[in-house]
Amino acid sequence: MKHLASVIGVVAILAVSGCGDSVPATPSVSTAEGLWSGTIGTNRTLTAAVLDDGTYYFFYSVPANPLQIAGVIQGTGASSDGSFTSTDARDFGIGAATLNATISATYQNRQFLNGTITYAGGAFMAFTSTFNTAYLTIPTLPSVAGFYFGQAGSSGGVQSANINVIGDGTFTGAEINGCAFSGTVAPRIRGNIFNQSVTFGGGACFFGVSSFQGIAFFDLANRRLLATAPNSNRTDAATFFGTRL
């Protein structure tokens, strides 16, 4: 089983908050919606966000190193009577080719989401996760403001990068190779998740001059930002993870 590349992927992203006003948000009791934390494959950690519209983002780490993101699995899924399925999963490994996959899982509201990711050709990975109560907080733009240092990458490799998020939701960033980017973040209707839009400025940027949309999640307890944005045809994704200084 090969994938789940190692090392992270190209620039992007932004911000999200972890906390904000601790006002409860209510995910649907009949779907897999929520934020989930667990393990995936062999000795890898998983942070998974399933949004209210069924779109999901599964961030996974390199083996035995939860602080190093290796890629993101993204797609749309359907929830029905404790079963969550997806036929359009894409595994955007950092430093690796994008892989097509399907997902078959079971869930119980605010308790667990467990299943299998199966790749074309038959390789598969199992995952288990439990509900992360951070999903019950409503984020605010000021709460995510700050300077983040970490890594950004895509299928083309990884670069050290930083992002500076302003309290109005705008941000600017740069990679060590000179690529500059900017964008905005906006809180979703509930959950500890933000929509984000990022635009690359050309020059040294792997993605040239282009704009992507995705999400960002801020792990308040660890001051870590996880963000990703696939390109429009879902052949690659820009991913960022870092720590707020």
Image (cartoon, rainbow, N blue to C red):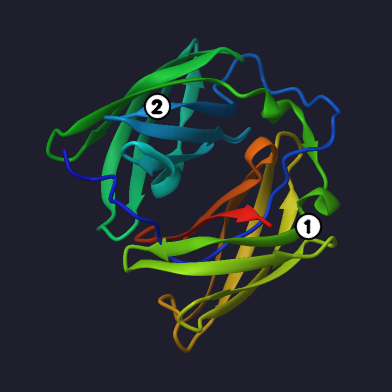
Observer-nearest residue: 158 or 25?
Answer: 158
Sequence-first tag of 2 and 1: 2
Residue 49 in which image quadrant: top right
Residue 83 located left or right of residue 144: left
Q: Quadrant of residue 166?
A: bottom right
Residue with the most extreme left position: 121
Which residue is under mark 1? Answer: 145
Please tell me which residue is depicted at 84% across the width and 62% down the height of the picture.
168
Q: Is mark 1 on a helix, strand or loop?
A: loop
Q: Can residue 36 be seen in this view?
A: yes
Q: Which amino acid does label 1 sit on?
A: Ala
- The percent coordinates of residue 35 (x first, y second) are 59, 29
Where does the image place residue 226, in percent across and percent down from the top left? 56, 49
Where is residue 14 shown, x and y percent of the image? 63, 59
As measured in the structure, the alpha-carbon distance from the residue carrying label 2 to the one carrying label 1 is: 29 Å
- Does residue 54 show up? no
Give the residue drawn at x 18%, y 43%: 2
Task: Please give the name of the residue rendered at 60% of the width and 50% of the height, measured from the top-left corner.
Answer: 215
Quadrant the C terminus occupies: bottom right
Q: Which residue is the extreme one toward the front?
A: 245
Q: Label 2: state its secondary structure.
A: strand
Q: Where is residue 100 in the image (x, y as percent from the top left)?
A: 27, 46
**Rendered view: 66 above or below 8:** above
Residue at the disc numbered 2: 39
Pointers 2 and 1 in contact (C-beta within 8 Å): no
* Displayed quadrant of residue 220: top right
